[in-house]
């Protein structure tokens, strides 16, 4: 069964990553094994510390949930080798296949064989009846033939003009060149004439080779067939390898990861009978027809720690959202069907999920409980954030007891900063979110630390980068929060209108910076103030 991806927001923080892991674990514990944790961005150093501490691997990274070719019910059609006979290929085409892929020896695409290409080949034989370099065993196969002489055992391929030698009332032979393939019946004189001419092949239809000619000195390959002459003349051309019949140029093909939107555009431009599907190794995995594009299977997702389209996985509009578990304001995500929605005013998504375990009578494994405790400590900034509630504290304490860990030690481990060693790009994008407020586009990034003065030494570098981001994305403002746990406040670095900061926070900024005491939360203290100002 296809997985149900549980994913947090882009540029994920610890709460987002752990919420995905915990929610997937909750459903797996109650038997829903298809739930799989995923992430949309690079794991931060803080989150990696927590994962390492409790023995977890980072979730699988996904880049989008657009409908892809792999989501279609395309046909796992048979793949033909280049040497397959026209006869065998046509038999397979008749099994409700409009077109079939032809593969090289290594499994990669060589060409496409359609009913149309087979018909065109045979229509061309009306005026041209020449067989060219066809393997002898192909001929024997389609004619159900048997070699009757030693010369036949020495022949590998067959070439020549195909002729039916009818009884003649005069002395002129129907063939005059050794480069002939002669089909005849019980006609001793015609047989002897063909052997004397050393034609390439003599096909005896429903007759025996006369006893006196069995050791006749000739270079002609003699075979017998149970078919009559008319059928043999038709069937012998079906011994042609399909590599000579199939189309090999200008083939429109798709890969499993190609988007359905792209495939629809290409199909409108190239109206083929069938389109080969290739995997990441260029191996053929099936054939797609136009009707397969009508109803692709949607990818299924659960969103945790966010409910805003701009923060979610690309292609969300083409996916089926099954549930949203969040603690932020309600935003702009819409669904086509009713879903499970749980949004609670707490400081951490993991507080909600921990209580979902309890509601189902389940206790998280000790390492998972420790992971969830660390996520709650992280998102509530050691319970100093204004978003923190008594439920966050009691839930974190309960998870810590299950895991037998100290919350104080977890906090110190989380917020002992390694940020100062990062590039300014890493600092800005570690926990970065974009917002649209009353027609104003902006970005707010946050770094939680215990040594903000050391980070301020790089303010000029940060401001330069933030100006570049604002110009490139046409943002009204870009804000970086250096939230200091020890100072219980935030060093706010920004680019944009000074008056906005002055009016929103009742402060006087200087040189693109201001300290905001008791400001710890982007969600509850920064965004609401800007929303009030602009709204």
Image (spheres, helix red, strand yellow):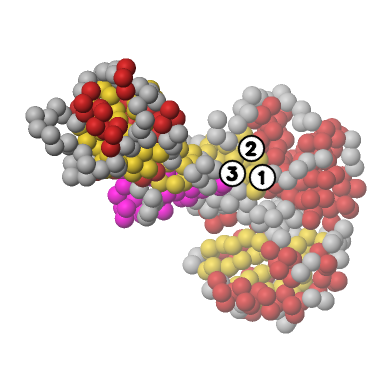
Q: CA distance from mark 1 to mark 2?
A: 8 Å
Q: Residue at x 79, y 50 (%)?
A: 48
Q: Is residue 292 visible?
A: no
- Kindly indicate the quadrant of the structure image that contains residue 139: top left
Q: Circle 1 is placed at which residue position?
A: 60
Query: Any magenta on residue 466?
Result: no
Q: Nearer the viewer, residue 118 or 206?
A: 206
- Is 378 rendered above or below residue 184? below
**Which image quarter is the N terminus in?**
top right
Q: Circle 2 is placed at which residue position?
A: 36
- Is 407 rendered above or below residue 149? below
Question: Would residue 504 appear left or right of 308 to someone viewing this image?
Answer: right
Q: Circle 3 is placed at which residue position?
A: 303
The answer to whether mark 3 and mark 1 are in CB contact below 8 A is no
Q: Residue at x 37, y 43 (%)?
A: 133
Structural crowding at the residue carrying mark 2, measured as other residues with C-alpha within 10 Å and reported as few (<14), some (14–19) or many (≥20): many
* Marked residue nearer the N-terminal end (3 or 1): 1
Q: Residue at x 62, y 45 (%)?
A: 7
Q: Secondary structure at mark 2?
A: strand
The answer to whether mark 1 and mark 2 are in CB contact below 8 A is yes
- Kindly indicate the quadrant of the structure image that contains residue 19: top right
Query: Any magenta on residue 279?
Result: yes
In percent of width and height, residue 219 lies at 37, 35
Q: Is residue 168 visible?
A: yes
Q: Secondary structure at mark 1?
A: strand
* Marked residue nearer the N-terminal end (1 or 2): 2
The answer to whether mark 3 and mark 2 are in CB contact below 8 A is no
Q: Residue at x 38, y 50 (%)?
A: 248
Q: Which residues are magenta?
A: 253-281
- Is 261 rendered above or below residue 194? below
Question: Would residue 352 appear left or right of 201 to someone viewing this image?
Answer: right
In percent of width and height, residue 218 lies at 36, 33
């Amino acid at each position: 069964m296809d997985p149900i991806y549980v994913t947090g927001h882009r540029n994920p923080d610890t709460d987002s990553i752990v919420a995905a892991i915990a929610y997937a674990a909750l459903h797996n514990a109650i038997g829903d094994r298809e739930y799989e944790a995923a992430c949309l961005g690079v794991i931060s150093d803080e989150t990696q510390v927590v994962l390492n501490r409790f023995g977890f691997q980072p979730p699988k990274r996904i880049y989008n949930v657009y409908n892809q070719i792999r989501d279609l019910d395309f046909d796992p059609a048979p793949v033909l080798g280049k040497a397959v006979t026209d006869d065998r290929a046509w038999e397979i085409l008749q099994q409700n296949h409009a077109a079939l892929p032809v593969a090289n020896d290594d499994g990669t695409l060589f060409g496409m064989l359609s009913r149309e290409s087979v018909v065109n080949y045979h229509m061309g034989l009306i005026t041209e009846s020449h067989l060219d370099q066809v393997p002898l065993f192909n001929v024997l196969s389609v004619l159900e033939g048997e070699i009757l002489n030693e010369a036949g055992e020495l022949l590998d391929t067959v070439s020549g003009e195909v002729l039916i030698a009818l009884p003649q009332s005069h002395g002129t032979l129907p063939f005059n060149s050794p480069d002939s393939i002669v089909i005849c019946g019980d006609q001793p004189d015609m047989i002897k004439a063909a052997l004397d001419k050393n034609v390439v092949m003599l096909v005896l239809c429903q007759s025996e080779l006369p006893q006196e000619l069995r050791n006749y000195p000739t270079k002609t390959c003699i075979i017998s067939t149970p078919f009559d002459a008319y059928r043999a003349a038709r069937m012998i051309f079906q011994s042609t390898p399909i590599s000579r019949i199939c189309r090999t140029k200008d083939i429109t093909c798709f890969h499993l990861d190609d988007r359905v939107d792209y495939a629809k555009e290409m199909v409108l431009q190239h109206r083929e009978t069938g389109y080969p599907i290739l995997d990441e190794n260029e191996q053929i995995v099936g054939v797609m027809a136009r009707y397969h594009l009508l109803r692709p299977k949607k990818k299924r997702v659960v969103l945790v720690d966010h409910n805003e389209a701009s923060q979610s996985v690309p292609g969300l509009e083409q996916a089926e959202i099954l549930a949203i578990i969040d603690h932020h304001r309600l935003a702009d995500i819409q669904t086509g069907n009713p879903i499970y929605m749980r949004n609670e005013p707490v400081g951490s998504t993991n507080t909600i999920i921990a209580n979902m375990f309890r509601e189902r009578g389940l206790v998280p494994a000790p390492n998972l409980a420790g992971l969830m405790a660390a996520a709650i400590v992280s998102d509530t900034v050691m319970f100093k954030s204004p978003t923190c509630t008594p439920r966050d504290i009691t839930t974190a304490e309960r998870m810590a007891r299950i895991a037998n860990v100290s919350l104080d030690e977890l906090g110190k481990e989380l917020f002992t900063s390694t940020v100062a060693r990062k590039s300014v790009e890493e600092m800005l994008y570690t926990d970065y979110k974009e917002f649209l407020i009353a027609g104003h586009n902006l970005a707010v990034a946050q770094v939680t630390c215990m040594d903000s003065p050391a980070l301020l030494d790089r303010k000029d570098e940060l401001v330069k980068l933030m100006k570049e981001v604002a110009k490139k994305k046409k943002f009204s403002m870009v804000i970086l929060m250096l939230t200091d746990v020890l100072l219980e406040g935030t060093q706010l670095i920004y680019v944009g209108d000074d008056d906005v900061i002055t009016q929103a926070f009742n402060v006087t900024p200087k040189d693109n910076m201001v300290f905001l005491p008791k400001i710890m939360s982007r969600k509850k203290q920064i965004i609401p103030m800007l929303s009030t100002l602009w709204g």
